[in-house]
Image (cartoon, rainbow, N blue to C red):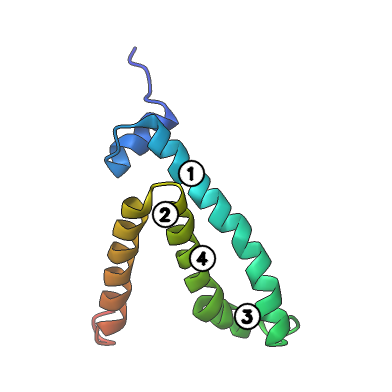
Amino acid sequence: MSEKPSFVNRLKKKWGIANTMDIILILVVFSLAGSSIVFVRKPVFNLLDINNSHFAVKATIYLLTVFPCYQAFLLIYGTLLGQFQFFWDKEKKMGKWIINLLSKKPSEK
């Protein structure tokens, strides 16, 4: 019976990374960015006074303000922990995906 690859080894293969320490640092960056965004969302929603608004309003504001902040946190923490290139490559890939999604004609979607 063959042994299933570990979580870390699967991430290494998926992301094309050879070093286990790089995987750990990348996971730390995701954790720090996710934790930091919790502190950003609340003041943004309070500033815009949308805490009691309809879900669609909150979701729209979140996507327009908080989501870009999360992306910036990924780059900032990635830079501080020596993983800038990994996160920059992911940001470029996601940016191209969003542009392609938004540039499709309604009949193509």
**Residue 103 or 34: which is nearer the viewer?**
34
**Local SS, label 4:** helix
Camera-near label (3 vs 4) is 4
Camera-near label (2 vs 4) is 2
Q: Are marks 1 and 3 in contact (CB under 8 Å)?
A: no
* Real-space Cα separation, disc 2 to disc 4, in angstroms: 14 Å
Q: Are marks 2 and 4 in contact (CB under 8 Å)?
A: no
**Local SS, label 2:** helix
Residue 50 visible, this angle: no
**Residue 39 or 61: which is nearer the viewer?**
39
Please name the residue shown 32% across and 70% down the image.
Answer: 95
Q: Name the spot of residue 2 as percent of width and height, x first.
A: 33, 15
Which residue is identified by label 2? 79
Q: Earlier in the sequence, mark 1 or mark 3?
A: 1
Which residue is identified by label 4? 70
Please name the residue shown 46% across and 60% down the image.
Answer: 76
Which residue is identified by label 3? 58
Camera-near label (1 vs 3) is 1
